[in-house]
Image (cartoon, rainbow, N blue to C red):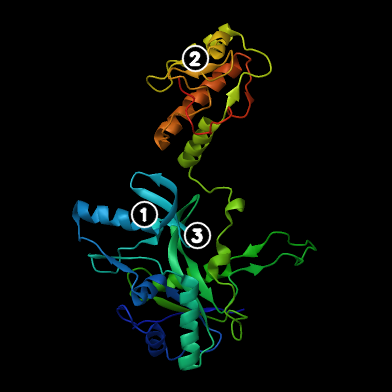
Amino acid sequence: MRLEILPVPGIGDVTEGDDLAAMIATAAPWLRDGDVLVVTSKIVSKAEGRLVDVPADGPDRLAARDEVLAAETARVVAARGATRIVQTHHGFVMASAGIDASNVDKTRLVLLPRDPDASARALRAALRDQYHLDVAVIISDTMGRPWRNGLTDVALGVAGMPAIRDHRGEIDPYGNELQLTQMAVVDELAAAGELIKGKCDQVPVAVVRGYLGVAGADDGEGARVLVREAALDLFSLGTAEAKAAGLREAALLADGPGPSPADPAAVDRAIAAVAGVVAPGTVFTQVTDAEVRAGMVAGVPGWPVHASGLVLGAPPAPVDQGDLVRFGADLQRLRTALAAEGISSAVFPPPVGSTASAALAL
């Protein structure tokens, strides 16, 4: 395979309603069957009207951008200062949901295409129907990568070729059967196109020529196959967010003292060990047999309760996410201190009529 990467200059500024197929075909009359068009998502978004008006500067602009980001976000993956890594409604994990303020008027922001695969299919169909060209189309955008500095272009949408080249089952030159190798070829082609498009050169389209298997192909499944399923994602949250999620879950666990009553003196020592590091105002005491029999507290004998009457493991109500994380952190510290005293807890179902998030208060 011999590849060429060719720029398509002269497309000019794109506005809502523009015919991208006509603009590309006019700027590149030398296109031929089997070419792969790598099209920057921004001009697709502009043609489709995926822009929002915002103030040119100042705090109002920041507030407006935050509102737009919230609307484009399916979930927050990680946040550090002003940086937000989020999952978009498409399934992409990107900084700021791919919202872009470059190469556009200062009073506007560009959003990602609503359905990049559909955009790629529509552009491919227009080039085929209007100009009798059988090409593949990749809609690309810039992304960062976990564990690596720098940015690269990747495919958001594709039509006319498979997004992944699957080598599983093939035999390498040493006789080994490939078990896992699946190459994201559309990402590789998107990155190759970026080498000549650049960010400031006003060349939003590149052509990769010589990639085999494009002419005559159907639209394919699109780039959505590149989005990893949540169940297979080992790194679905940032470090701080994963820790917070774990502490929230810890706060929802219902704990008991195990099959035999704990030594009250050992429980007191565990409480004393963490008293200076738990959240201010957090105090744990022990539930006595008499208090349980008298109905003074809902709990089990020989096990700590919060000063408000909360049994260890039952979070405060109403549940505030921040309070829940802090409560979970306190519980984790106390569990660790109890374990150091040789006291192991056993999970048991919450009392009848209660819920995991309900307060077992006096």
Residue, disc 2: 296
The N terminus lies in which quarter of the figure? bottom right
Label 2 or label 3, whichever comes before in sequence order: 3
Can residue 34 be seen at all in this image of the molecule? yes
Residue type (three-letter) at the residue carrying disc 3 = Gly
Give coordinates of residue 219: x percent, y percent: 57, 79
Callout 3–callout 1 Cβ contact below 8 Å? no
Which residue is nearer to you in this view: 115 or 297? 297
Label 2 or label 1, whichever comes before in sequence order: 1
Can residue 5 be seen at all in this image of the molecule? no
Say above or below: 29 vs 322. Answer: below
| Helix, strand or loop under label 2 | loop
Q: Quadrant of residue 210?
A: bottom right
Residue, disc 1: 70
Label 3 or label 1, whichever comes before in sequence order: 1
Near mark 2 (Cα within 10 A), the count class, few <14, some 14-19 or many ≥20, is: some
Cα gap from disc 3 to disc 1, whole angstroms: 15 Å
Instruction: Give the left or right position of residue 97, taking residue 314 as reference.
Output: left
Q: Residue at x 48, y 77 (%)?
A: 120
Given this view, does label 2 or label 1 mark the residue nearer the observer?
2
Residue, disc 3: 91
